[in-house]
Amino acid sequence: MGDMPIDNVVKQEFILPLLNRCPADRSPEAGVLKFLAAKFCSSLFVYFMLKYAMEILLAESSLITAYYFLWSTTNVAIFLACLGLTVLPINTIVGSYMSSIFEERQVLLASQIMVCLGIVLSFHVIVPYSVLQYVCSALITFVGAEVLEGVNLSLLSRVMSSRLSRGTYNGGLLSTEAGTLALVIADETITLVGYWGMNRLLNITLLPALIVCISSLVATCFTYNSLY
């Protein structure tokens, strides 16, 4: 070592070897990427949930209403049209008023709770199953999902990594694929449960929707402080 200062000796003999042995994923850049990935995956899962819940509601509406209420095709069409008419007013209210009063993450959490509430109210636990119960629960679920979609896509674009904002396999493609996957799984769920009989269709198809909704709510709670 000769006349080398003691601080240089310590640096070369102890500190530098330890730094060289540190894995790459402990770098600050890797930590930031993991942080962004967690938020992005959470938002993507929320998008999957809302598409799944909405598809369960809309796709089986004609079957449920015909079985429980003996609705005709015309009545189902009017019901779905009334649900669709709520899209523009709700998005206007959220965009013009709620976004200026509440944070987007607060609206996100509240709308998820609203979707969960709508799904819970849709279960057939009271005999007889009334039109009022079905229409009110469907309206709560649909409106909550519409609010959730706009707010979640806004947050999704904000938490997206720069690597996912360019190229073919970008964040837009991933969110589209997540939504498509949710629609496919929801339709397959309705098809498979339909073989067990119409009397079981409503509750059994709502059960996985409720599980997915609660799971997404938990994921949002874990990443809530980082959503801004």
Image (tube, rainbow, N blue to C red):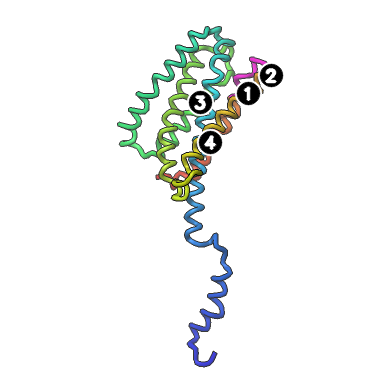
Task: Tell me which numbered mark, 4 or 3, is placed earlier along the sequence.
Answer: 3
Label annotation for residue 177 = 4
The residues tagged by marks 1 and 3 sit, at their Cα atoms, a distance apart of 15 Å
Residue 41 colored magenta? Answer: no
The part of the image, by quadrant, that contains residue 21 is: bottom right
Give the side of residue 157 with respect to residue 13, left or right: left
Disc 1 versus disc 4: nearer the observer: 4
Pointer 2 residue:
196
Task: Tell me which numbered mark, 2 or 4, is placed earlier along the sequence.
Answer: 4
Residue 138 in the image: x percent, y percent?
49, 20
Residue 199 colored magenta? Answer: yes
**Magenta region: which residues?**
196-205
Residue type highlighted by circle 4? Glu
The residues tagged by marks 1 and 2 sit, at their Cα atoms, a distance apart of 10 Å
Q: Secondary structure at mark 2?
A: loop
Farthest residue to the bottom: give it. 2
The residues tagged by marks 4 and 3 sit, at their Cα atoms, a distance apart of 16 Å
Disc 1 versus disc 2: nearer the observer: 2
Residue 31 in the image: x percent, y percent?
50, 57
Pointer 3 residue:
54
Disc 4 versus disc 3: nearer the observer: 4
Residue type highlighted by circle 2? Trp
Residue type highlighted by circle 3? Met
Task: Tell me which numbered mark, 3 or 2, is placed earlier along the sequence.
Answer: 3
160 versus 151 height, above or below: below
